[in-house]
Amino acid sequence: MASLDTAALTEEMTRRDAADPLRHLRERFHVPAGMIYLAGNSLGPAPVAAFRDMEAAMRQEWAEGLVKSWNDAGWFALVGTLGDRLGRLIGAAPGQTVACDSVSVNIYKALHAALALRPGRNAIVAEGGSFPTDLYVAEGVVAGRPGLVLKLEGVDAARIEDLIDENTAAVLVNHVDYKTGALRDMAALTRLVHDKGAVVVWDLCHSAGVIPVDLDGAEADLAVGCTYKYLNCGPGAPAFIYAATRHHDALSQPLSGWWGHAAPFAFERGYRPAGGIQRLLCGTQPILSMRVLDAGLGAIEDVPLSALRAKSLALTDLFMELVEPACRARGATIVTPRDPATRGSQVSIAFENGFAVIQALIARGVIGDFRAPDTMRFGFAPAYLGYADVQRAAEAFNEVLTGGLWRDERYTKRRAVT
Ligand SMILES: Cc1ncc(COP(=O)(O)O)c(C=O)c1O
């Protein structure tokens, strides 16, 4: 492929786009004209149906329906109805997933729930390279429970598998690493965690909606994830939390708010946890944000995740193939695994001046992002990206890197979000 000249490559990409069985999905999203959006692993684009839904949620449900809409528009039930729809995308049978709160808050609840399932054990195991919030929250949990320790892959042992033993209560692990894009074998690690008698909490932020996930099939215990990346449900959209049915009776979590009560509208004096997954809820949810989930999920849920996965792998393969020669020539390193079995839906490239490269690309309409200290991330969402987009992005990347176009004062200025 890399050996084809530009005209032949363009022809080949046009052919692939025309033959793409998922090409109709693109019109379900608003991708600004001329932009190649490779940051869907950070914030997905707006689903077109959300414009209509938000208008209805504001003008009819809120403005006209007011408080009646908690019942009439199904607001109160959204945590569960959307939870079950999310469940279908992550291999969870109904009644095990709720849409609520943020990932960070859900990790807090999940870790406490996991610890309560394994009393007498004194360790949480996690990845030293995890997304920071996972570790910050785990540290917060440990700080509040004397005797509990946090053991980290990459710090206390090279492999997470070697840290899990009879003292481990909970293993908090990412399905796909946010920085490198490496994908874990969920079934195998869950089995190992269970063999040691511990409970696993999966963070699905970088796999939900783009990789077939089978929580029930893997016999996972708990999971959390966001909806603003590959699920395209909007900035700060409600997250989700999953707990396997077999744990529900014994589940407990410290954010014992009224939405997790067995009878929230009985207004009883004491807390009595709800029977099922509702027990992991806390308080009133941001209904307007929640209303976007319908459109976000609706934009992909009629498509098999296996088809999205096949295209995602083809897109990431293509990008790596097209940028590899320039990377090699300029001392940049593709850190994402080449093996499809261990790769998520992004390509990460380490380069000392990666921040400036990303800024130069953004100036050319190719939007990626940067994670300190040196990682450029390019997310490939199969629902709205095509093969010609990948070609254009790779050409821009090669031009910026090879031509040193990133060496411009303009591309060094860092703002709050990178
Ligand atoms: C793996 C992972 N966990 C958690 C988060 C963020 O959590 P929150 O939604 O609470 O900000 C992210 C955000 O990018 C993430 O990549």
Image: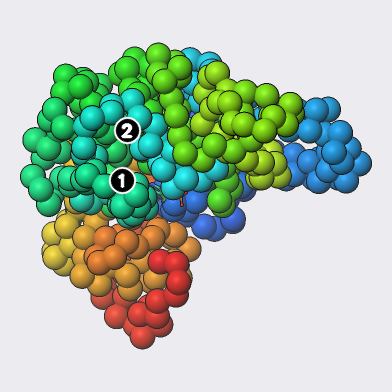
Residue drawn at the location 36% of the way across and 37% of the way down: 111
Residue identifier under label 2 = 115
> Helix or strand or loop: what does disc 2 sit on?
helix
Residue drawn at the location 17% of the way across and 57% of the way down: 333
Q: Earlier in the sequence, mark 1 or mark 2?
A: 2
One can see residue 184 in this view: no
Q: Is residue 94 left or right of residue 306?
A: right
Which amino acid type is marked by label 1?
Arg
399 above or below 58?
Answer: below
Give percent across and percent down for residue 209: 46, 33
- Residue furthest to the bottom: 409
Q: Quadrant of residue 407?
A: bottom left
Give percent across and percent down for residue 142: 29, 48
269 above or below 380?
Answer: above
Give percent across and percent down for residue 179: 28, 52
- Colouring mode (rainbow / by chain / secondary structure / one colour): rainbow
- Residue furthest to the front: 269
The alpha-carbon separation of the residues under discs 1 and 2 comes to: 10 Å
Give percent across and percent down for residue 76: 71, 31
Q: Which mark is residue 43?
A: none
Residue drawn at the location 59% of the way across and 56% of the way down: 33
Marks 1/2 in contact by CB < 8 Å: the verdict is yes
Residue identifier under label 1 = 145
